[in-house]
Amino acid sequence: MELEFIKVINPWGESYGGNQNSFLNQPNGKRIKRCGCGLMAVCDMTLFLQKTKTLPWAEYVKSVCEKAKKLNITDSFGIPTKKVIKMLSESNPDYTFSFIPKRKLSENGLRETIGKSLSEGFPVIIRVGENFRRLPYKMNGNDRKMRWHYFTVTGLDGDNLTFCSWGRKGEMKCSELYRFFGVTGGIIVTKMKD
């Protein structure tokens, strides 16, 4: 299953969600580029919940910069999960957002929770914490590794996850996500309020 995710129409083409690297010439641009992945996840999830399919670059920049002002990004390791949840809640009052840390998930539980959320129509925000081995993934057919990062899962097929990060679609194994989550890793799930 894969959800249709937002497309940002920018001067250099179309991106799959937002790309923090594109904000260098914007207010707080250096900080957004360096540690704005949580901000991108919040903006992308908010636009998804508003049922936005495509968005012109100028409108996306405005949305990100408004949220960046409120967030006051100061932590060199990114945005704490509590701030991400608070921002999601303030931007999307009809929904609730919960963080489930890795320690409360088994590998199968992670896969089941992501699958259930996607089947209910909600992407899942992943928080990869510090890990010295780094989480392996593929983007544009190239092997890469990450740590200290937020990204948004938009699809699951067996053990294969599809996700949005840096304005592109990436792929990774759910089993590897579980193994390389890092101590502070976990997932943010969305529910509609009753």
Image: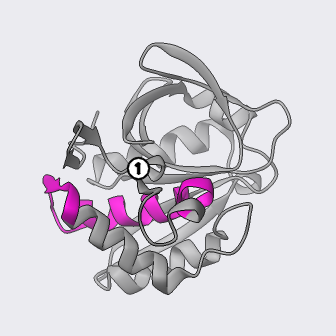
Q: Does residue 155 appear in this view?
A: no
Residue situated in front as seen by the camera: 17 or 191: 17
Residue 191 part of the magenta segment: no
User: At which x and y percent is residue 24?
Assistant: 47, 56
Q: Which residue in the structure is indicated by mark 1?
A: 22
Circle 1 SS class:
helix
Residue situated in front as seen by the camera: 6 or 8: 8
Q: Give the vertical position of 123 relative to 107 (above or below).
A: below
Q: Give the residue displayed 15% in from the left and 62% down from the top.
A: 51
Q: Give the vertical position of 168 relative to 194 (above or below).
A: above
Quadrant of the snapshot with the C terminus: bottom left
Q: Give the vertical position of 148 relative to 13 (above or below).
A: below
Quadrant of the snapshot with the N terminus: top left
Looking at the picture, which amino acid does disc 1 mark?
Answer: Ser
Looking at the image, how many numbered discs can be counted on the residues? 1
Q: Give the residue displayed 61% in from the left and 23% down from the top.
A: 144
Compared across the picture, whether 86 is left or right of 156 comes to right
Q: Does residue 44 appear in this view?
A: yes
Identify the magenta region: 32-58
Determine which quarter of the picture holds residue 169: top left
Q: Give the residue displayed 81% in from the left and 41% down from the top.
A: 131
Q: Overall secondary structure of the magenta stretch?
A: helix
Q: Callout 1: 10 Å neighbours few (<14), some, many (20+)?
A: some
